[in-house]
Structures are given as C-alpha cells and as structure tokens.
Image: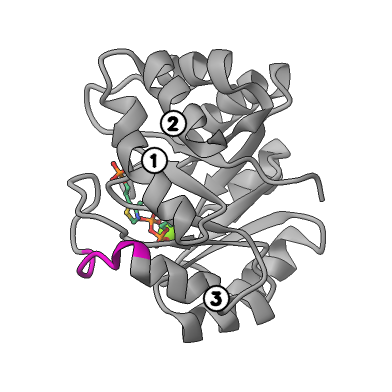
Amino acid sequence: MPSLGRLHLITDTREGRDPLAVVRAALTVAHADLVVQVRVEDSATDREAYDLTRRVLALCASYQATCLVNDRLHVALAVGAAGGHVGADDLPVAAARRVLGPTGVLGATARAPGPAREAVAAGASYLGVGPCHTTSTKTGLPDPIGPAGVRAVVDAVDVPVIAIGGVTAARVPALRAAGAYGVAVVGAVSAAADPARATAELIEALTC
Ligand SMILES: Cc1ncc(COP(=O)(O)OP(=O)(O)O)c(N)n1
Ligand SMILES: Cc1ncsc1CCOP(=O)(O)O
Ligand SMILES: [Mg+2]
C-alpha cells in the first residue's frame, strides 16, 4: 500500500457548501499529500454519493491524491476509490475489510486504546481518533479526548493515527507531539475564507 497522506480533507456537503470547489482548491496546494474522504449527509441517496465520489476521484487522480469514501463502501468499490472509513454505526471493521479486500485502505474510528487495538486486529489500516477538540461539524459526539487521548491510542497501535475533531493548523503541533501521524479536517478548510491558504497552513504545520 502506498504511504498514507497526512492531511485528510473530509467533504462538507451540508446545504450551501461547495465541496468540489473546496477539494479543487486543496488539491492545488497539497497534491499527493492530500487524502480526500467523501462524506455525504445520511439523507443523501447512494446515487448522489456515487456522483460526487466519481467527480472527487477524477480530481484526485490528476494529483495522485487518495480518495476514500466514508461509510458507503459499495460506493468506494463502484467508483474505484482507494478505500473507505467506518465507525461504530457502520459495518464492523472485519466485515469492511472483507468488502474492500486485502489491499484497500480501511480507516476505522477509535477513541480509546482497547477499541483501537481491536480495530487494527480486525484489519484497519489507519485509525481516525477523536474528537480531539470540540467541533460543531458533527453533533452527538462524546467529550473531546485532547492530545493526551490521542497519545494513549498512538501508544497502543502500530498503524497511522489520524486526529480528528476541531483540528486547526494551530492545534496540529500538539497533536503531532502526541504521536498523531496526520489530521482530518472539515471546517478548517471548508469553512475557511480561502481554502487553498488554509490547506497550505495545515500542510506547513504537518511538515514542521
Ligand atoms: C479520519 C476519520 N476519523 C473519524 C471519522 C468519523 O467516522 P464515524 O465515527 O463513522 O462518523 P461519520 O463520519 O460516519 O459520521 C471519519 N469520518 N474520518
Ligand atoms: C466526522 C467527525 N467525527 C469526529 S469529529 C468529526 C467532524 C470533524 O469536523 P471539524 O474538522 O470541522 O471539527
Ligand atoms: Mg461512519
């Protein structure tokens, strides 16, 4: 498997957002360092998810960037994306691994060392760990775990840990110091006045 990018941009498909414009802007800066995870609203149809993912994948292909699909692994397979990401309400990690096959990139959400170890044993190739900080992008989340919570998971597994939840460029150094391999963001790029600049700041923070 090629090495995983350190900056994961998760699409924001809420009303009034323009996910393709944001992905395009981020790719012009981050190129192959970017992983784009296509995440649609639960209310979106599979056809909508499929159409968006095809377009994101085409953009990613121009920059040799990686495209993953959140939750809907059949969409990932249908478009030929590199893999997908699952959490507690999605397919179990072992089932997701069977769907994607041995070479697909499979992310799994984990917030604590025990579940993190289980996810890796079941076939996760990286872990999304958080929420690290408070976020308004997703509701119903448990309390933030902070850099110390990230460190606890990092110490328990031997796969890349991607910190998620309220991540900004200013918060990257503490997360990296805690052992995070990379970060996943929605708002830090999608809600920025200048998504390309916001991407550059995140990349810079990740490479320091
Ligand atoms: C990199 C990364 N980490 C965590 C998540 C969250 O996934 P999940 O817990 O399944 O929640 P939803 O995103 O599906 O609402 C993620 N998507 N990516
Ligand atoms: C999908 C998800 N899972 C945990 S936090 C989160 C959203 C992160 O969004 P933001 O980067 O805007 O805080
Ligand atoms: Mg999910």
Estimate how packed mark 2 is, as few (under 14), some (14 to 19) or many (20 or more) residues with alpha carbons within 10 Å: many
Residue that numbered label 3 is attached to: 155
Residue type indicated by callout 3: Asp
Residue type indicated by callout 1: Val
Residue located at (45% from left, 69% from top): 151
Which segment did they paint magenta?
Answer: 141-147
Q: Mark 2 against mark 1, which lies toward the viewer?
A: 2
> From mark 2 to mark 1, how far is it between C-alphas?
10 Å
Residue 89 at least partly seen? no
The verdict on label 3 being within 8 Å of ligand 1 is: no
Circles 2 and 1 in contact, beta carbons < 8 Å: yes
Residue type indicated by callout 2: Leu
Residue that numbered label 1 is attached to: 185
Residue located at (17% from left, 46% from top): 136
Q: Residue 162: x and y, percent?
A: 50, 54
Residue located at (27% from left, 47% from top): 166
Circles 1 and 3 in contact, beta carbons < 8 Å: no
Q: Mark 1 against mark 3, which lies toward the viewer?
A: 3
Residue that numbered label 2 is attached to: 202
Query: Could you say whether the residue bearing mark 3 is in a helix, strand or loop?
Result: loop
The verdict on label 2 being within 8 Å of ligand 2 is: no
Front in this rendered view, residue 94 or 30? 30
Where 166 falls versus 13 (above or below)?
below
